[in-house]
Image (spheres, rainbow, N blue to C red):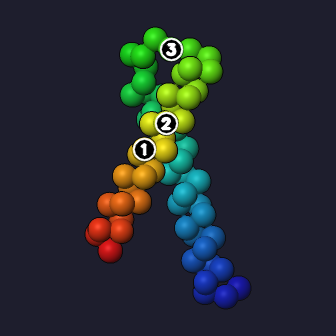
Amino acid sequence: MSKMKELDDIAEGIADVTLELMDDSTHWQLSDYKQDGDEYMELHKYVMAKAIEKMYLQAQHDL
């Protein structure tokens, strides 16, 4: 296996675990919001996307 493929596999594993943790954390953080169903899922999706955007921007700044 090439080094780049190996590094890509590592990055994919980290992304999978990070998204799972973020999903759980987002559900926990939104527990006080009274929306449910589609409204809740839209709120959850928005918060996840904003968090990922902020992480990306921070990573670009720090690198």
Q: Tags 1 and 2 in contact by the CB under 8 Å rule?
A: yes
Please tell me which of labels 3 and 2 falls first in the chain. 3
- Residue 36 visible? The answer is yes
> Residue drawn at (57%, 77%), measured in percent from left and top?
7
Q: Tags 3 and 2 in contact by the CB under 8 Å rule?
A: no
- Residue 24 visible? The answer is no
> Residue drawn at (62%, 79%), measured in percent from left and top?
6
Instruction: Give the quarter of the figure containing the C terminus.
Output: bottom left
Label 3 and label 1: CA atoms lie apart by: 19 Å
Label 1 and label 2: CA atoms lie apart by: 6 Å
Instruction: Give the quarter of the figure containing the N terminus.
Output: bottom right
The residue under label 1 is 50
Name, please, the residue furthest toward the bottom.
2
The residue under label 3 is 35
User: Residue 12: image x %, image y %?
Assistant: 60, 63
User: Residue 56: image x %, image y %?
Assistant: 41, 60
